Amino acid sequence: MGFVTLVVVSIIIFGVVEFLPGDFSQAILGQSATEETVAAFRKELGLDKPAHTRYFDWIGAMLQGDLGISYSGRGASGSDLSRPVIDLIAPRFWNTIFLAGVAALIAVPLALILGIFAALFRNSIFDRTVNVFSLSAISFPEFFISYLLILLFASIWPIFPSLANVSDDMSLGERLVVTALPIVTLVLITLAHMMRMTRAAIINLMASPYIEMAQLKGVSPTKIIVQHALPNAWAPIVTVIAFNLAYLVVGVVVVEIVFIYPGVGQLMVDAVTTRDIPVVQACALVFASAYILLNLIADIISIVTNPRILHPK
Amino acid sequence: MDEIKKITKQLRAGQISRREFIVAAVAAGAAVPFAMSMSSNVFAAMPKSGGLLRHAITGGSTSDNLDPAKVLDMYMANVSFGQLRNNLTEIDSDGSLIGELAESWESTGDAKTWTFKLRNGVEFHNGKTLDANDVVASINHHRGEDSTSAAKSIVAAVVDVQADGKETVVVELSGGSADFPFLLSDFHLSICPARDDGTIDWESGTGTGGYILEEFNPGVKVVTRRNPNYWKEGRAHFESVETLYIADVVARTNALQTGDLDAMTRADLKTIHLMEKHPAINIVQSTGNQHYTLPMLTDVAPFDNNELRLALKYAIDREQWKTVIARGYGEIANDHPIGPANRYYDASIEQRVYDPDKAKFHLKQAGYDSIDLDLHVAETAFEGATDGGQLMQDSARAAGININVVREANDGYWSNVWQKKPWCASYWAGRPTEDWMFSLTYATGADWNESHWSNEKFDSLLLAARAELDEEKRRGMYSDMQQIVRDEGGSVIPIYASFVQALSNKLSTPEKVASNLEFDGHKNSERWWFSS
C-alpha cells in the first residue's frame, strides 16, 4: 500500500515539476539567456528528450538508489564539478532530522504529560490555561510565531541568535543554542494537536464501565489513567503523534527559511528557484517517503497496542 | 591648506608621526587644538586589522560553483571577485581605472593590440608565482565556440591572447576598443592559476586575492581567512570573512538588528526609515549606474512610433518615482542608460520632466486622441515595479493615456515576458563604460537589446567612439549618443536606483564608497574594517 502511494506520488511530483514555467537553462542564465546558450545547456542536460522517457530514466535510477546528478556545478569550457544529489541532500537531511528530532523529543513527552494532567484535572484552571495557551500557539502561522520569538528572545532580550547558522564543527551544546528558536517554534506549533488528542482520548475512556469499576475499587486517579486508560488510548494518540512528526519533517520549510537554517526545506526552495529539477524531485520524494513511513509506523503501533485489532474474532 | 592635505596623507600612510604632524600643521598655520583633533580624526579613520566580518548577500544558490565563468549573480561575485581573486584591472572607489595584477598597459594607435605588463612577484594562495600563462589561460577560459561562459560576449572581440615572456601579455582584438582595459575589470575575468594543458584550476578556489578559501557550502555560506602574503598594501583587514546567502530581506534585517550580522546588501526600502533611526546601524548608499527601465518593443505597433514613445516619456513623473519607489535612494534619470558614475555622462543634456501637455502634444502627433496600453510588470524586474506602474497609470491619465498594469509572475518573467510583451519593466545594474552599456542593450541586433531598437546614426557613432583614443572627440560622440537615445530610444528610463546597504556601526568604510557595484564594488572585504 505504502509502495503504491509512493509510485503515485512520484508521478505527481514529476508532472508538477514539468509544469514549472521556464527550465534550468533559462533559470541559471536568467536575464542573460540567449537562444544558443539555452539550447547548448538543454542538450547537455538531456532536457531535449520527451517527458515520459525522462520519467522512466529517473524512476529507474531512483529504484537503484541513484538520486541522480544535480544540474548545478557545471562549468564552462568542459569542466564539470556537478555534485550527486545525494551529496547535496544528505547533510541537509541530517540537519532537518536534527531539528525535527529535538523538537519531537521535547514536544511529544510534554504533550503527553500535559494531556494526561489536563484530563486528570479536567475543567480546572490548569486545564483551561494549558488549552488556551496551546490553542493560541497553534492558531498562529509558524512564521508569525518565529518572528514573535525573534522579537522577544533575539531583539528585546538577546538570549538566542536569530540566525540558525550551524556548522559542522559545532558541539551539541552550541548547536542547541543556535537552533533554540526554531526548535521552540516547532514545539509550539505541534504541541496543541497532540496534547488535545491525548486529553480527549483519555476523557473519552474515563466514561467506560471498566474505569468506573476501577474507581469503585478505589484505585487512585493517576493509576487509573496511566495503567487502565492510557493503554487503550494509544491508537488515536499514536496516529496524531505520527502525523505531527511527519509535519515536523515536512512542514519545517517556512521555519527553515525564516531562521536561514540549512535543511532540506530550504534546499528545495532554492532548487525550485534555480529549476534544479533532480534536487526538487529528490527532496519531494524524501518528504513523501518520510510522511508515508511515519504513518505506516503509526498504523503498526496502533495495531500492536490494540488487542481487539491484534486478535480479530 | 594644500600643505595640511599633504601631511594628512603622510600621517595616514604612516610616513610621519603624530607629533611631527601636529608640529607641521601648526607651522602651516593651523591652531594647536585644531591640529590635535585632526590627527585624532586621521587615526580614527585609519583601518584596523582583525575581526570576523559576517555579511549577507542575495543572489546565491545551491548551484553556485567557483568557476569564474559561472558567476551569475552577486553572491559569487563577492566571493570569487571580491575575496579570492584579482583581475588585471580594478575600478577604484572614484570610478577610475587602476591596475590590479597589471602594472601598466598600452595599445597601438588603432586600439587593436593591447600589451599588459604584469606586477612582479605576486603569489597565488598555493605559493605559485603569477605569470603570463595564468592570464592567458584565464582569458581563454571564456572564449571558444562551445563556451557557456557568462562573459563570452565580453571577450568576443578577442582574436588572440599571447604570453610574451613571463611578465607580458599581448591581446589582439578584431576591432579597436579604447575601453578594453575597463572590460578586464569585469567580475568574471578573474585570474586563476593555469594548468599545464592551458586550462585553469578554478575548482580549488585558489587565487591571488586577499582571502583564502576555507569552507565552500553553496547556497549557505562561504568562509575565508586573510591571505598573509597579500600583495596589496593596506587592504584586506579582516582576520576572516563569513559570507552568508540570505535571500529573504526580513531575515537579513532581523539578523543585522540582533547583531548576528555586520553588513547586508539591499536593505528593504519599505522599512528603511526605521533602519535609519536604529542607533547601531548605518545606511550606506552609493548612486551608480543602476537604472530601472520600461522598454517598449520598437518593432511592434504602436510603439514603432517615436512620437508615442515621447508621449510616454513625458507622461511619467520621475520625481514621484524617486520619492515613492526609491524612497529617496536614487536620482532621476533622463531616458538614457549612462549614469552619473560613467566617465562621459553628459549633465548638460536637458532633464526631461513630467509634462502632461507635452505628452498630449506628442500623442496627437502620433495620431491618437487617447490610447489604451498594457504595461507588464513583476517585482523581479525591480522592487516596486507594480507600484511604479500604478503611479504612471495615474500620471499618464492626464495626457489621455490609459495604462493597464498587468502583474506577471516572477517565475519565468525574464523568459516569457521580457523582450516578448510589447511593454514591460526591466532593470540594468549599469556598466562602467559607455561602450559596454550601449553595445549590450542599444546596438542593433544585440542579444539584450530589450526594445529591439535600431538607429543607424547611433550604430555608426558607437563603432567610431569605440576605437577613438582622443578623449575630447570621444566625449562628444558619447554625448551625441546619450541625446539620441534620450529622444528616440525605445525605453522610458525614469530613475537611477542607488545601492543601499546597511552596516553595523562597528564597521568603517573609506570616505568614498565605489558605485560600480553594490558593497563597494563588491570589494568590501578588502576595503572595509572594524573601527571598534
Image: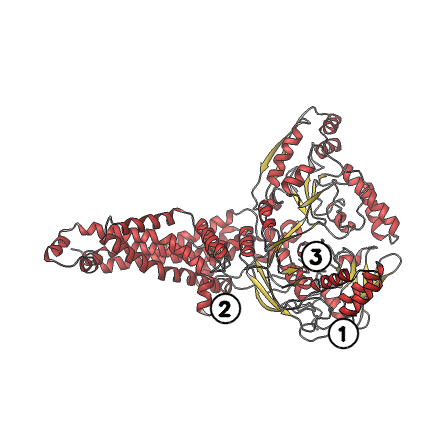
Question: x, y (%) of residue B289?
Answer: 72, 49
Question: x, y (%) of residue B26?
Answer: 82, 63
**Dot 3 and dot 1 residues touching (CB under 8 Å):** no
Q: Is residue A115 left or right of residue B471?
A: left
- Give the distance between the C-alpha atoms of the residues marked 2 and 3, in whole angstroms: 35 Å
Determine which residue is flagged by label 2: A168
Residue A214 makes an appearance in the image: yes
- Give the distance between the C-alpha atoms of the residues marked 1 and 2, in whole angstroms: 37 Å
Decide: few, some or many residues near mark 3? Use Cα within 10 Å; few <14, some 14-19, many ≥20.
many
Residue B519 part of the magenta segment: no
The quadrant the C terminus of chain B occupies is: bottom right
Determine which residue is flagged by label 1: B121
Question: Which of the pair A284/B185 is nearer the observer?
Answer: B185
Against B120, residue A120 (above or below) is above
Residue lying farthest to the left in this orientation? A217
Q: Is residue B350 left or right of residue B413?
A: right
Chain for disc number 1 = B
The quadrant the N terminus of chain B occupies is: bottom right
Question: x, y (%) of residue A130?
Answer: 31, 51
Q: Secondary structure at mark 3?
A: loop
Query: Which numbered disc, 3 or 1, marks the residue closer to the eye?
Result: 1
Chain for disc number 2 = A
Decide: few, some or many residues near mark 2? Use Cα within 10 Å; few <14, some 14-19, many ≥20.
few
What residue sits 59% from the left and 36% below the top? B406
Q: Which residues are magenta?
A: B116-121
Determine which residue is flagged by label 3: B151
